[in-house]
Amino acid sequence: MSVDADTVRRIGRLARIKIEENDVEKLQGELNVILGFVDQLSEVDVDGVEPMTSVAPMALRRREDEVTDGGYPDQIVANAPLSEDDFFMVPKVVE
């Protein structure tokens, strides 16, 4: 895939980046080089390669999933402007 000058201008407009007319040719070349590197990736044989989330194999640390009520609802609602029976009170927003 090759990027032309109109595409560079369009990318700049979509990214909300002001591109001066004398920079269009330079950016066109840079984008084409980047796309060339991406094209090279399609030539790599990845058959039988397992997907990875990291270059170093690691296992996620896990904790037991324990359900608790917190044990201190009065402290949780202490700074609320309005509360009742340890629940936050908010104004009605839907009619």
Image (cartoon, rainbow, N blue to C red):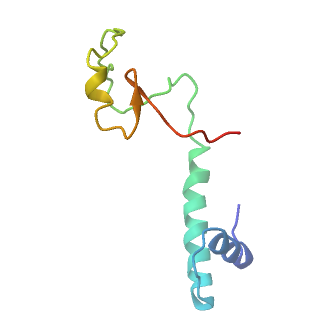
Q: Quadrant of the N terminus?
A: bottom right
User: In this orientation, which residue lies closer to the viewer: 65 or 46?
Assistant: 65
Residue 65, by quadrant, is top left
Where residue 21 sits, quadrant-wise, is: bottom right
Residue 49 image offset from top left, x and y in percent: 51, 25
Position in image of residue 29 (x %, y %): 58, 75
Question: Residue at 57% of width from left, 50% of height from top?
Answer: 40
Residue at image point 59% right, 59% down: 36
Residue at horizontal 60 percent and vertical 68 percent from the top: 15
Can you give x and y, in whole percent of width and height, for residue 6 in the image? 74, 77
- 21 or 64: which is nearer to us? 64
Position of the C terminus by quadrant:
top right
State whether residue 2 is above or below residue 47. Answer: below
Say which residue appears at 62% left-offset and 42% top-offset.
93
Numbered circles on residues, count? 0
On the image, the x and y values in percent for residue 57 come to 33, 24
